[in-house]
Amino acid sequence: MARGLPRTLARAAAREAGVNPPKAGLSVKTTGSGGRWRSVFTFNAMQMTVTDALAYASLKIFDFADGKVRINGGVAKMQFAVLTTRASTINDNASLTWGLGSAAASAATLATTMQNVIAVTTRTLDGATTALSTASIADVVAPATLDGTATAIDLYLNLSFATGTDIDGDGTVAVTGTITLFWENWGDNV
């Protein structure tokens, strides 16, 4: 019985930090206590559909608990593959822009809260047919505090194609890689 107690407490602490919505191809491990956390997001061919009409897509990957969330740092190493026919959907050598933010993408140009955790990074989708692109590496540029006291903060992976020549029809992108974030939740005293 005592053997399982530390594991149970670790799970309870992780739930206190926040939860990840279930997504095929995504696992999240959060460790820490006392309001200081480390979350590792592991992507294993997680699929995202990008429509030709919008040329951007979003996927919520985490729900922080209520409170002021301070993102202290982190790193990402991501690769992307196109799963649909390249000639009629997402073209060969398309220029993909991605970022991590507290808001879902709402335009092909990812800006402000669409990339306020990991700033916009551009990667050419150079993998042939359905092969992975070369790795795209990014860091949290600067520590930031997100106010989740009125409404809890969500975390979104956002993708976009800035030019219409990169996408000719609805396509599917598979995301593979890891993002590690070090963060704190200062609580909700409101």
Image (cartoon, grey):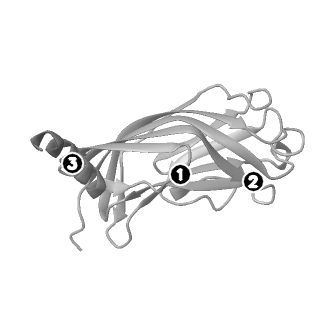
Determine which residue is flagged by label 1: 23
Upstream in sequence: badge 2 or badge 3: 3
Dot 3 and dot 1 residues touching (CB under 8 Å): no
Residue type, numbered disc 3:
Thr
Quarter location, residue 186 = bottom left
Callout 3: few (<14), some (14-19), or many (20+) C-alpha neighbours within 10 Å?
Answer: few
In terms of depth relative to the viewer, which is nearer, 53 or 73?
53
Quarter location, residue 106 = bottom right
Dot 1 and dot 2 residues touching (CB under 8 Å): no
Q: Which residue reaches farthest front?
A: 1
Determine which residue is flagged by label 3: 8
Upstream in sequence: badge 3 or badge 1: 3
User: In the displayed structure, would residue 13 be above or below residue 188?
Assistant: above
User: In the displayed structure, would residue 50 be above or below residue 174?
Assistant: below
Q: Residue at x 66, y 40 (%)?
A: 174
Residue type, numbered disc 2:
Ala
Upstream in sequence: badge 1 or badge 2: 1
Q: CA separation, marks 1 and 2?
A: 22 Å
Across and down, in percent, residue 64 comes to 36, 58
Across and down, in percent, residue 35 comes to 22, 52
Tell me the quadrant of the picture where the N terminus can be found.
Answer: top left
Determine which residue is flagged by label 2: 55
Across and down, in percent, residue 181 comes to 38, 41
Q: Secondary structure at mark 1?
A: loop
Q: Secondary structure at mark 2?
A: loop
